[in-house]
Every structure is written in C-alpha cells, then in structure tokens.
Amino acid sequence: MFIAYLFFFLFLFGLLFERLRSVLSPWLSGLDVSRSARQLGRSPAWVRVSIFLAPLVSRFVKSDPELRQRLLMVGLPPTYREDGFAVTRVMSTLIVFFVGALLGSPLGWSFWNVLSFSALAFFFPILVLRVAIQRSINALERDLPVFLDGVAISLAGGYGLTSALSLSTEQFSARDSSLSLSMTRLVSDLRSGYDKESAFKRLRDQTISEGLRRFAVACLTSEAGGSDLSRVIEQQAKSLRRLRLSQMERRAMEAPVKMLAPLVLCIFPSTFVIVLAPLLRGLSSVFS
C-alpha cells in the first residue's frame, strides 16, 4: 500500500512540476543542455515521472529493442525505455484503482468492478502505443515520397548524399515527425563515421515502416551496383506513390462492404419502424 501511495503522490508531483517548469523556463532558458535533455523537458509529466521511477522496476523488465524502437518512433525521449513503459502501465493501473475506490461507493461499484477496470487500465497503454505507432507509420509513409523527391533533386544538383539527406530533413524537422527522427539518426550515423552500407543497414533493421525499409534496400542495391543514386531515389518515390494510391483504392473498394453492417443493423430497422409503425397502427385499428 505504501508503494501505491508513493506512485500516486509522485505522479501528482510531476503534474505540479509541469506548472513550475513553465514559470521557471525564462530563468532556465540560458542553460546549455543536451538534445535528449531538451526533449525530456518537452515531455509530459507522466513521461518524466516514469523515467524517474524506472530504476525501481528495471531489474524485473527484460530488454526489448523492438519496443524501444517503437517508443522512439512515436516521439518519446531516448531515456524512456522498457522499464519506463512498465512504470507507465503500473501508474495507469493505480490511478484507475484509486479513482474507482473513491468514486465506487457513490456509483455503486463493487470491488470486483474496480479491480476489472484497473486490469483494463494495465493494458490500456499498449493499445495507445499501437494506435500511435499506426498513426506515425501512416504519417511517415505519406511524407516519404515528398522527402525522397527533395533528396533526388539535391543529388541531381550536385550535393553529396549526407548533405542532401540533411537538407531534406531540415524541411521536416519543424513537424517533429517519425520521418524526421529516422532521417536524423541516419544523417547522424553517416556523419559519425559509418559507411553508407552500414548506415542504411541500420535503417533497414531498425525501422518498422515498409516504405523506409524499401528505401534503405534500394539505396543498398544502388551502392552495391554502382548505379545513379538520384535516379534510384526518384524511382523509389514514384513507386511509393503508386503503392499508396493502390492502398487508397483498396480502402475505397472496402468501404461499401464495411458500411453494409451498420446499414442492416442500425439504419434499415430504424427506417422500417418509422415507415411501417403508422401503417401497422392504422391496420390494427381497422381490423379491431
């Protein structure tokens, strides 16, 4: 029980710290902090509290590089890892449990109702993460053809690969999207001494986007075959546009089938009730 109260009060402290940070930010703006620290400073209070409490559960959480990559893809700071995600799940469970315990009596909830909602809250962050990842992938694959067009134009204009990637990444940096984060890591690898093959292999192995994986494979093939990289990237952008168009056409064809169930179960019965109810009432009065 003491640990539960500790988690709850530390979460409240994180909310208060968010308010204090906005008040003290003019005095702290002159400090020189690293990029990860700045990203952590922009993070919500629950992220900072989870990172602060992560050492308490780190020994019980297995290392999961795939989960870590997914957390990075949705824009969470690099210090928010598997143990921090586990703390978030525990915090959501405790918050729902305490709220249910406080409001359960007025609402007529039993202990098992509160316990059931708390168990659902334990798995709720997983659902939120999956939805956020899917939205991030959709946004990445929507912006990727435009990004590749910029890289191809820069390469055709005489820029090197690293400069072309950096120049195109700057155009997307203001959005703070998953595409910008992935390309920033790729540019950082190229500038830190990795050769092109190793950098693109890291991009291929770490990303969970099929479009980025196709881009990395195309660049690796071009590097191995010695073909013109600008033409390869331009063809890759066209291929991704055709793929996205075919996906949109498939979704448009699936829309009538998905609308069939609401029509049959909801709209048609309501229409029949509205149209046939006066008629049946009139007929019943005549025959009675």
Image: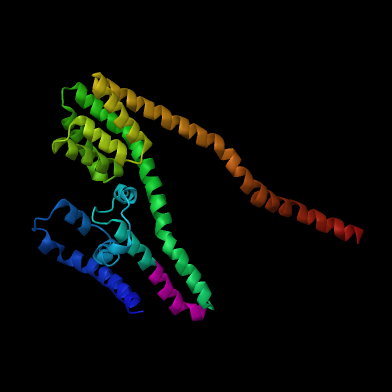
How is the rendered protein coloured? rainbow
Expressed as whole percent of the image width and height from the top left, the position of residue 26 reads 12, 62
106 in the magenta segment: yes
Is 56 rendered above or below residue 64?
below
- Residue at position x 33%, y 77% from top? 5
Give residue 59's position: percent from left, percent from top.
29, 63
Q: Is residue 60 visible?
A: yes
The answer to which of 47 and 85 lies nearer the viewer is: 85
Q: Quadrant of the N terminus?
A: bottom left
At a point 31% along the width and 72% down the height, the residue shown is: 7
The residue at the far bottom in this view is 105
On screen, residue 273 versus residue 114, left or right, reads right
Q: Position of residue 29 (x, y in %)?
A: 11, 58
Instruction: Write the start and end of the magenta stretch as one range.
Output: 93-107
Q: Is residue 229 left or right of residue 107?
A: left
Q: Position of residue 27 (x, y in %)?
A: 10, 64
Question: Residue visible at 23% across and 56% down?
Answer: 79
The vertical placement of 15 against 71, above or below, is below
Which corner quadrant of the image does residue 231 belong to? Answer: top left
Residue 52 location, quadrant: bottom left
Residue closest to the eye, 106 or 272: 106
**Is 24 on the left-hand or right-hand side of 75?**
left
Compared to residue 227, the image places residue 185 above or below, namely below
- Answer with the quarter of the image where residue 8 lies: bottom left
Asked if one can make out residue 230 in the rendered structure from this viewpoint, the answer is: no
Q: Residue at x 11, y 62 (%)?
A: 28
In the picture, which quadrant includes the C terminus? bottom right
Residue 215 on the magenta segment? no
